[in-house]
Image (cartoon, rainbow, N blue to C red):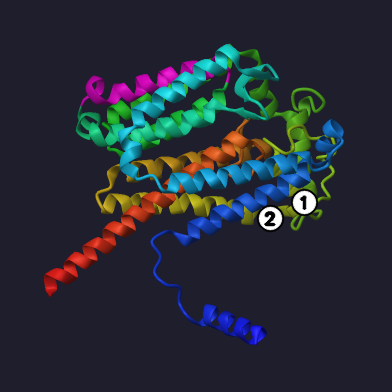
Amino acid sequence: MPLRDTFANLKQWFTHPAPQALFDRQLVWISLGLMLTGLVMVTSASFPISYRLTDQPFHFMFRHAIFLGVALIAAIVVLQVPMKLWMKYSSLLLGIAIFMLIVVLIGGKSVNGASRWIPLGPFNLQPAEVAKLSLFIFMSSYLVRKQDEVRTTFFGGFAKPIMVFITFAGLLLLQPDLGTMIVMLVTLFAMLFIAGANLTHFLALVVAGIGVVITLIIAEPYRVKRVTSFLDPWENPFGDGYQLTQSLMAFGRGDWFGQGLGNSIQKLAYLPEAHTDFVFAVLAEELGFVGVVLVLMLIFSLVLKAIFIGRKAFEHDEFFGGYLAFGIGIWFAFQTLVNVGAAAGMVPTKGLTLPLISYGGSSLVIMSVAVAILLRIDHECRLKAEQQEKNAENEQE
């Protein structure tokens, strides 16, 4: 009997359409797929360094699994928060993020010359990740409240968010963390463009932003070395170009179908940061071109979902949710391009994580919260559409 019931349930699952849901199921499965991929790849990539540092081969796997559990719990909690509360307290979130960035400069944990983490016992909090989401929430709120001013005046509406960004940028550069600053800058530009900012003001801001980034690179010798080593890593393969040449070797060994899960050679103390910034290189070596394409399809499916949710929010006059959904989608897309581009030698190394895949508690939790916010935006749009349908039916009756 139990076996017969099982077959009957399977037949019903395949032959009957799913009931109407008030959330985006595809977005849930895409996100869970990326998280599971991340757990598998972090386990594989961290095995050698974990054994070398702790004599425990699965130390980083267990930590990443704990982070994953915390991220899922945080996402479930955030899913219950109405979007109007995010908009109401956007300025408070911005203030908290600025306070955390100041705290990390005063008493933060320094790793490889960068002070980016606040030690909280067994967990290190990276305020830069909180700052990204806080800025995008604040910007979405600001664009709703000051939409006309942003489109018409420079000093009245357009310049104010730029001043907020400059505050963040100054605190981030003191860490230093140029990569996060660039992600925030690009996403901010895109959100202003979507909001219909004056084209002249927008182009002037883009030119000024590019000029500032170039100046910041030239001002620091180690950033200049990163750019020059990226242009020709084989010129000094055992010096400045070491990390990139090892990553390129991993891509080359991957071929079409990879060496097999767990069979990477580059992760055996050759490729630094194999389970964090360069986990994509290990993925390419073990899963090959096919695995790379599948993972990138998952990530950019999530990005497309964010864009479609943003468009749906605009159609239902949920402008705050629309701006925020577009901001999250652009953030995920650009950070993925930078991470993958750095691993493949297309852009200089920036130390940014691969969304929902790389090892790192702060990044995983904040990006899971961002996905939960996307689900909440979509949920509220569906509720509104359902209510409109009911009202239309009542009017017909």
Question: Mark 2 and mark 1 in contact (Cβ < 8 Å)?
Answer: yes
Residue 286's disc is: 1
Q: Is residue 397 above or below residue 76?
A: below
Secondary structure mainly formed by the magenta segment: helix
Q: Is residue 93 left or right of residue 5?
A: left
User: Could you tell me residue 117's position as x and y percent?
Assistant: 61, 23
Disc 2 is placed on an element classified as: helix
Given residues 216 and 300, the one toward you in this image is 300
Give the residues drawn in magenta, as a range: 153-176
Q: Residues within 10 Å of mark 1 (few under 14, many from 20)?
A: many
Q: Which residue is mark 2?
A: 291
Asked whether residue 382 is drawn in magenta, I would say: no
Q: Amino acid at mark 1?
A: Glu
Residue 166 inside the magenta-drawn segment: yes
Say few, some or many: other residues with alpha carbon within 10 Å of mark 2 (under 14 / 14 to 19 / 20 or more): some
Please tell me which residue is depicted at 38% across the width and 61% down the height of the picture. 22
Q: Is residue 333 visible?
A: no
Q: Secondary structure at mark 1?
A: helix
Q: Residue furthest front?
A: 1
